[in-house]
Amino acid sequence: MSLESEIRKMLASQGTDFVRLVDVSNLSFLQNKGMSVAILFGFALSTKFIREVASNENYIQELIRDKRQDDDEFSRKEIATDQIADDIAGFLHSKDYAAYSQSEKNLIANDCYDAETHSTHLPHKTIAVMSGLGWIGKHNLLVTPEFGSAISMCTVLTDAPLPAVSFPAASPKCGKCTICMDVCEVGAIKGKNWTKSSPRDERIDVYTCTTCLKCLVHCPWTQEYVKKNIERLSDTFGQPLLT
């Protein structure tokens, strides 16, 4: 079995909904750490979860108030993607390849997360755009044609000889839509379309953002995903429950 097949088998066994092998060789050393390939993978959030959050404007506040953060599907999938990234990096190390997990724990441990600016050298969504998976919306989240913004993802950098490709950044398909800005009660979203040269702070005030998920769940592309996949009710990692 080829190395690519082994990695894809490992990720499939975890129920991931998408996997991309991305050529990041043209990025700076600060971003790619001298490695040429990024393994991008992730889960789609269940439509049940999206509808629950969309129908409860106080979802996050109630979650925190009742100390039920462990019940939150998005949090669980974020933790799962991070653990899988660590496992993939460990697997590649066992094959004598360089590998760097971009899990939250590893980024912090290696001083690759700037707590003051809430930023990393190479965000997962940057790699996702390079993979052709989607574009950056006005809410500064990745938007995909298939899942909208309802995804959790992570990445692993490696020098392993994997068949990686990259694509030009897709232009945003947000048009004149301002729904994400309209539902943001703290005014963190400024309503400007992403461009390759525009800084993050022109689109969103990350210091004001409360991570309420309203922009994520109300995005028309996310809502379209819900309409097309009403049967995807399970919050298990990528395993839909047909009803």
Image (cartoon, rainbow, N blue to C red):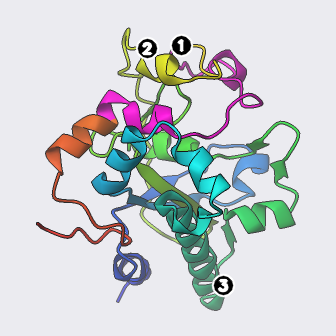
The type of residue carrying mark 2 is: Thr
On the image, the x and y values in percent for residue 134 come to 39, 38
Where does the C terminus fall, quadrant-wise? bottom left
The residue lying at 58 percent from left, 69 percent from top is: 70
Q: Which residue is mark 3?
A: 93
Q: Secondary structure at mark 3?
A: helix
Which label is found at residue 191? 1
Question: Circle 3: is it few (<14), some (14-19), or many (20+) Cα within 10 Å?
Answer: some
Please say if 31 is above or below 13.
Answer: above
Residue 124: x and y in percent read 58, 50
Q: Which residues are magenta?
A: 193-221
Question: 170 left or right of 206?
Answer: left
Visible residue check, residue 124: no
Would residue 107 appear left or right of 68 to someone viewing this image? right
Q: How many marks?
A: 3
Q: Element at badge 1?
A: loop
Q: Amino acid at mark 3?
A: His
Disc 3 versus disc 2: nearer the observer: 2
